[in-house]
Amino acid sequence: MPRCAWCTEDPLYIAYHDQEWGVPQRDPDVLFELLVLETFQAGLSWLTVLRRRDYLRQVLHGFDPRRLAVLDDADIERLLQDPGVIRNRRKLEAVRDNARAWLRQEAPADWLWSFVGGQPRINHPAHVGEVPVFT
């Protein structure tokens, strides 16, 4: 399979690239997990987050928004002491706040897809220099 230039030889990254990246996803549970992971990714490499994904899934209740929405400050303090977690208070608070916002949506997956008319928008640059700065 041809791979994007950003994909390293790391088996975890290759598996992500080949099986997940660019695959349209409509399952609300999977979309929420990606939202949580993207929250942790800010300022870090995606590979760093992927390497912690399984552990984050364990300590963050399987990325269940109902359970994450009720995290209290003591839960966040406990998570900040866990070396397996990306220990950033604002990111952990954002996970809780995003879970609350997610649960307020009647059909969050449909809501997300509404921004692109229900269809994925895919860029096919010939080389890395053609990748848009924003889409």
Image (cartoon, helix red, strand yellow):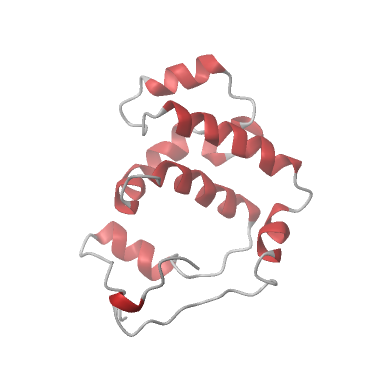
**Residue sitting farthest toward the left:** 9
Q: Residue at x 34, y 63 (%)?
A: 15
Percent across and percent down for residue 40 are: 42, 41
Q: Using the image, determine if residue 58 lies above or below residue 33.
A: above
> In the image, 59: left or right of 11?
right
Picture coordinates of residue 68, whole percent (x, y): 59, 32
Q: Residue at image x 75%, y 41%?
A: 104
View extreme (right): residue:
106
Quarter that holds the N terminus = bottom left
Position above or below: 6 against 89? below
Residue 127, by quadrant, is bottom left
On the image, the x and y values in percent for residue 52 come to 34, 42
Numbered circles on residues, count:
0
Q: 43 and 16: which one is in front?
A: 43
State the residue lying farthest toward the front. 133
State the image coordinates of residue 113 (x, y, percent, origin top left).
67, 64
Vertical placement of 27 versus 42: above or below?
Answer: below
At x 42% / y 82%, what residue is drawn? 124
Most foreground residue, 125 or 74: 125
Quarter occupied by residue 42: top left
- In the drawing, does residue 30 fall left or right of residue 123? right
Horizontal side of 39 relative to 25 (left or right) equals: left
Horizontal side, residue 115 vs residue 133: left or right? right
Q: Residue at x 58, y 19 (%)?
A: 72
Q: Residue furthest top?
A: 74
